Amino acid sequence: MLKIDFITGALEAQKQGELKAGFESHSQINAAPSYNKERLNWTIQDDNGKLIAALTVDLLWDWLYIDELWVDENYRGTGIGKQLMEKAEEYAKLKKLSGLWLWTQSWQAPVFYQRLGFEEFTRFDDFPIGHSRIGLRKSLSNS
């Protein structure tokens, strides 16, 4: 008899490995590209080594997913966030990727990303209620 377990938090490493192998096997059967996701990070520290800004991204297939961009309150508005985003875009161009994409919330910084050339490709209204979750992407010309 099959049993359904409800688990909060991350799966055990063994089960996560089985899940990944199952996805990869299904992808190979359907001639899809290999699922190799790589986490990349850019960080900025002050002279004492304190983290003042970070950008985390996932490289998946030929797109760079911007997962987290954070800048310490004392350094916001100084251009550090823009510098980190430019580093990610330089990396994407160097690797000849198709583009970059991300999710942001209506209360976060959609205009910041739009000023960097990102365009909205989807919007979930009332997520959470009274706000929107916004999908933005920036296609790169690899010619």
Image: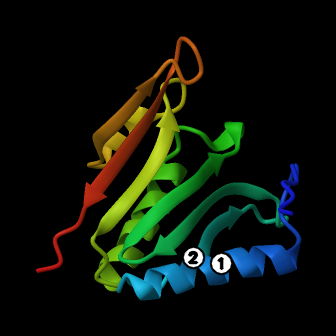
**In the rendered view of the protein, which quadrant contains the N terminus?**
bottom right
Q: Which mark is residue 23?
A: 2
Residue type of the residue flagged with mark 1? Lys
Q: Which mark is residue 32?
A: none
Q: Contact, CB < 8 Å: mark 2 with mark 1?
A: yes
Q: Residue furthest left?
A: 143
User: Judging from the image, what secondary structure is the residue with disc 2 in?
Assistant: helix
Q: Is residue 57 left or right of residue 44?
A: left
Instruction: Tell me the residue at 17%/78% (across/down).
Output: 142
Circle 1 crowding by C-alpha within 10 Å: few under 14, some 14–19, many from 20: some
Residue bearing the label numbered 1: 20
Q: Is residue 95 left or right of residue 68?
A: left
Instruction: Tell me the residue at 59%/39% (across/down).
Output: 76
Q: Relative to the observer, which residue lies in front, 103 or 90?
A: 103
Whole-angstrom CA distance, mark 2 to mark 1, is 5 Å
User: Which of the 4 image quadrants contains residue 100?
Assistant: bottom left
Instruction: Tell me the residue at 75%/61% (across/down).
Output: 46
Q: Residue furthest top?
A: 130
**In the rendered view of the protein, which quadrant contains the C terminus?**
bottom left
Residue type of the residue flagged with mark 2? Phe
From the viewer's perspective, is residue 142 above or below residue 10? below
* Residue 127 percent location from the top left of the image: 55, 24
How many numbered marks have been drawn onto this rendered protein structure?
2
* Residue 26 percent location from the top left of the image: 50, 80
Q: Is residue 137 left or right of residue 105?
A: left
Q: Is residue 92 left or right of residue 117?
A: right
User: Which of the 4 image quadrants contains residue 18?
Assistant: bottom right
* Residue 2 percent location from the top left of the image: 83, 62
